Image: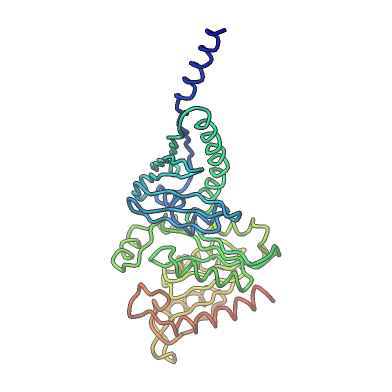
Amino acid sequence: MFRRLSFLLVSLLLISAVRAEPIELTISVSASPLQAWRAMCVDWQIRQWTDAESAYFELRSGGPWRITHPDQSLEEGIIETAQPAERLVYSYLIDDTETRVSIGFSKSETGCDISITHDEFGKGRSGEKLRSELLENWELKLPSLSAYLDRIPGSYLALPYGEATNPAVLLLHDRFGLNRALRDLADSLAQMGYVALAIDMFKGDVTSDMTQAARFLELVNNEESIQTARDGFLFLRDNKQVNRKRIAVWGIGYGGSMAVHLSAQVPEFKYCVNWYGTELPGATQLPRIACPVFAVFANPATNISTPQAENFNQSLTQAGVIVETILVQGYDGFADRAYGTTYSPSAIADALRLTLMRLDRVLKL
């Protein structure tokens, strides 16, 4: 009897001394490593693919992170390593126990491989229980992350209140990437009853520096941008809250040019809005634009047209496209602070008023 009790005691001691095995998971997505990295540590992107009510990541060694869910449960910890497009390492505090997560991002032929190692769960049955809970948490999260990164990586979706079917607007960013200004525009459109999707054509790159933005334009592949925009259109078309017969595309600067290019390839668009984009499709492509095009350019003297506006209007008119070109007071580049002296809140207000008036008329009536 004594030997049996001794054996049981030793067994329990051994069990309590054994550490739980690490969680090791790998998924492959069609996003870039930078897009995947941002999706896991940028506040607004986390809210795109999780149920998070709020998220905060201070991306420096020793910086805190916290995610709050609708039931007020928390996920939180401390950042150890934050190398964009390469690695994210942080502690994870749960039930007064601190664990550690290491996430690696590597480029693949089709996009990116994400490897996750979650370890340090403690010893014995309590460690195994914690490991089981966290594994279940990852297994619930990863399908949503994969869906976001495979369909609309790095993009921002803003929905109107309720579950009614609504018209939709596909938003295409300027040379600075998908920044706060475009996300704010998407939010404003959602408040007006539009489903708004601002897509990321620069694979996670974003800047407020003109020199870096010029570098983005040197490196970007227009065909890839157009394909990304097309994927955004397909996502909207398949969304249950979208009236697929009432979808518009609206681009600013570089995005304005891409909006016109995309309209030549997607006949289902109801309307195309271009704010001061100047690059046009080839002469054989222009006649394929089936929807009306509304273009906004700027000039300090609004009674005198600019060469950019003239060329845009003439090229589309000659191709048989229904086009309306207007001037607001200011300079092209008025819509983003990053342009510096050409940024103009008054020009934005005028352009918004004129654009929204036409969008409402075409998509809502």
Q: Which of the two residues, 289 or 355, is positioned nearer the viewer here?
A: 355
Q: In which quarter of the image is the C terminus?
A: bottom right
In this rendered view, identify the residue nearer to me: 258 or 50: 50
Colouring style: rainbow
Nearer to me, 125 or 159: 125
Relative vertical location of residue 214 with respect to residue 340 in this rendering, above or below: above
Q: Can residue 129 be seen in this view?
A: yes
Picture layout, residue 131 above or below residue 303: above
- Image-based side of 141 in relation to 345, left or right: right
**In what quadrant of the picture does the N terminus appear?**
top right
Q: Which residue is located at x 38 percent, y 65 percent?
A: 176
Question: Residue 231, can we see it?
Answer: no
197 horizontally vs 113: left or right: right
Residue 282, given in percent of the width and then of the height, sits at 45, 65
Residue 338 in the image: state x and y as whole percent.
35, 72
How many marks are shown on the rendered structure?
0
Residue located farthest toward the left when viewing the structure as drawn:
211
Image coordinates of residue 81 in percent, x first then y, are: 34, 47
Q: Is residue 244 above or below residue 303?
A: above
